[in-house]
Amino acid sequence: MTKASVVRWEERRAATGARPGTEWSPAVLCPSGPVSYPDASGSYPRAGSVTQPPSLAAPRTAHDPFPLYRTLRTTHPLHLDKPFGALLLSRYVDVRTALADPRLVAPPPGRTFAHLEADTHAAQRALLAPALQGRALATLKASVERTAYVLARRLTRRHEADLVEEFCHWLPAVAVVRALGLPYEGTAHVAALCRAGLTHLGGAPDALDAFLRPQIARRRAHPTSDLLGALCAARADGRPLSDDTVCGLAATFLGAGGDATGRALAALLANLLDHPEQLALVRARPELADAAWAESLRRDPAAHVVLRRALAPVPVSGGTIPAGATVACLVGAAGRDAARFADPDRYDLFRAAPGQLAHGTGRHRCPGVQLARLTADAGLRALLAALPSMAWAPGFRPAYEGLLTRSPAALHVRLR
């Protein structure tokens, strides 16, 4: 079980208000309802005639979570996973409800966009809008398209390439660097920080703080028209935003448009390369790119597990989430719920309603949705134009990695 696979125990205690140093227990996590304990092998004992499902924390789950997802949706829609340390929600209707319910908030640690207080959340969220409208949006779009074109053209003389390493990691990082007005030479550093664990919730690690603080100080002294400058100039309740808040909002944007978009773009390319006839359709009809993107987000979202903390009891189809519980919303399971989607494992860019879970819903709707879609569209169009013969390299099959976040580790393609 990797460090990124689960939230640290102390963070889980903090999420429920437990005192530091106290033992974690099912009573703290889920004060009501029966609890099943795994045996030494990590398997659950039988409860009556029904075998309890394995844990998200089991090593085999990260390799292939979909059998567990099917079991959870069918027989355990609200399941206490003690090894993982959370109640699991797996059905589409429950996950969608939970992601939009104001009684379920993002747990600690760190300054995150989701931690903003309810009464100022909408106002703070609106601060990100200037970078995604009018002249600022046109400038950003042109920059992303130019970067996508350059990255794609660099591959045209090659016979094979790994699109994850040589395209998907770089295009989203450049997009958010341009939007925030950060130094272009810092793109590699920003890309590394994004891959180190930033998400659309915008937790700001110390390394990112250290990178952003001098940029914020410069904009305090000499205002600029980029997004970071707009955040530095913004006022809430008549007062300028604190440096902490500006860092948190910038981290949100970096997380939304950086690593998460890179992972989602890799999944989109994998899905289309797996379905050459649909890839050909998008090549012939570029207006289908948005539909291809939405369907890929449903089938293979970058964030498979989104954590929440219950401030009050919340009823769901499998029972009631108790106040204080940590909840894992299994977006990866909800997107393949047969009760919501016909033939849910199939990739179909003509699917009528692929749902809207990958970027959150309600008050936790990811602020980088538009930037992510713009980046994916520009990237896909650039690759299709520059590499008309792009297909899987002989013998290659993409392998998805990760639990909380999941995407192809590599995309080896033949370019000629």
Image: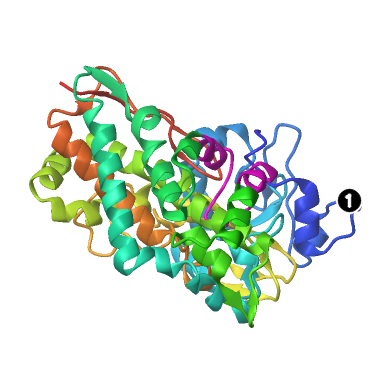
Question: Total number of numbered labels?
Answer: 1
Quarter placement of the N terminus: top right
User: Quick one: label 1, few (<14), some, or many (20+) residues within 10 Å?
Assistant: few
Vertical position of residue 346 compared to residue 399: above or below: below
Q: Is 350 positioned to the left or the right of 62 in the image?
A: left
Vertical position of residue 38 compared to residue 236: above or below: above
Q: Is 160 positioned to the left or the right of 267 in the image?
A: left
Which amino acid, by three-letter code, is at mark 1? Glu
Asked whether residue 273 is in view, the answer is: yes
Q: Is 6 positioned to the left or the right of 184 in the image?
A: right
What residue do we see at 71% from left, 70% from top?
322
Does the stretch in magenta take in 194?
A: yes
What residue do we see at 46% from left, 52% from top?
181
User: Camera-side residue: 168 or 70?
Assistant: 168
Range of the magenta residues?
189-211
User: Camera-side residue: 46 or 380?
Assistant: 380
User: Camera-side residue: 210 or 34?
Assistant: 210
* Residue 200: image location, x then y, percent: 52, 55
Q: Secondary structure at mark 1?
A: loop
Vertical position of residue 191 compared to residue 354: above or below: above
Residue bearing the label numbered 1 = 23
Quarter placement of the C terminus: top left
* Residue 311: image location, x then y, percent: 71, 73
Asked whether residue 338 is in view, the answer is: no
Q: Outermost residue toward the front?
A: 222
* Residue 253: image location, x then y, percent: 50, 56
The image quarter in which residue 87 lies: bottom right
Does the stretch in magenta take in 96?
A: no
